[in-house]
Amino acid sequence: MNSNFASRLTIKAKPDEITIDGARTAVLVVDMQNDFGAEGGLFHRAGIDISSIRRAVQPTAKVLNAAREIGLTIIYLKMAYMPDLSNLGDVGSPNRVRHLLFGVGNVVRAPNGGESRILIRDTWNTDILPELAPASGDIVLYKHRFSGFYQTELDTILKQLGAKYLIVTGCTTSVCVESTIRDAMFRDYSCVLLEDCTAEPIGQELPRSNHDASLLLIQTMLGWVSNSEEFVRACIARRPAESARQATRSSRID
C-alpha cells in the first residue's frame, strides 16, 4: 500500500473518535455507477428519486482527492452481471426475481446515444459516474450480490494490501453499503462510513429513513460513522506542511 504521507489518522466519528493506520487503510466506493446515480440509469428509468445519490457525489469526490493526496488505496465496487445473466441466481431466487423486475439485462439507449444494457458488465450503465472516475492505480472490482465480499477478490486484495481499516462511501446505504460493511465486520475489518458520501432512496418518506436506520446500526454495532469534512480534515493533518497550507487555501476558495 502506498503510504508516502499517510501515517496515523484521527477521525471524529460516532460512537467515538477513531485513530487508524493510514498505511493499513483503503477507501471503498460502492456502486457509484450510472445505473444508480445518473439519468438514464436503472433507478432513473424506474422512477426512483436519485437526488440523494447525486448529493453524495461532490463530498465523495473531495474524499477521493484527499485520500489520493496521502497515498491511500481506492477500491471501486460495481454491481453488474454477465451478459448471459449466468451469475444472476437460480430461477425463483430473490436476487434473480427482484433484479428482473428492474429490467436487468434489458437493452437500452444510453444518454450518449450508444446501445447499453441495464446492470450488465462493460456497458455505460455500469460505468462509474464520471465525476468519480477511477484514477491510475485505483482498483475496480465487479460484484454480483449486494455485498462487495461475496464471490469477489475483495478480501484477498485487502489482505495483500495489509489493510485493516476501510473508509466506506457509496450507495445505497441500507443495501449494498450496509451489506458490505456487515461482511467486513465479520472479517474483522474496522469500517468508517462517511454519512454524506452515501444515500438511500428506499424509505425516504418514512419518519426515520432507511438511511438513518443504517447509520444508527453501523455506529452502534458494525463500525463507525463520520463524514467527508472530518475525513478530509484528518488527511490534511497528515500531509506535509506545504500541501496542508495549499489544501486549506483551496477549501477556503471553494
Image (tube, rainbow, N blue to C red):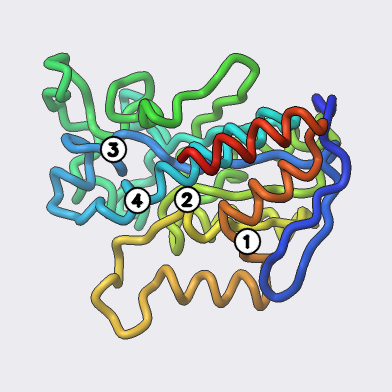
Tell me which corner region of the image, top left, top right, bottom left or bottom right, holds residue 73.
Answer: top right
Residue type at the position of mark 1: Arg
Say if mark 4 contacts mark 3, CB within 8 Å: no
- The numbered mark, 1 or 2, whose residue comes first in the sequence reads 2
Q: Are marks 1 and 2 in contact (CB under 8 Å)?
A: no
- State the CA–CA distance, disc 4 to disc 3: 16 Å
Are circles 4 and 1 on residues that touch, CB within 8 Å? no
Q: Amino acid at mark 2?
A: Phe
Which residue is drawn at the image coordinates 71% and 64% (left, top)?
Answer: 12
Instruction: Give neighbour class at mark 1: few <14, some 14-19, many 20+ (Cα, 10 Å).
Output: many
What residue would you read off at disc 4?
55
| 244 vs 79, nearest the viewer | 244
The residue that label 2 is drawn on is: 146
Q: Amino acid at mark 4?
A: Arg
Q: Residue 111: x percent and y percent?
A: 15, 24
125 with respect to 227 (left or right): left
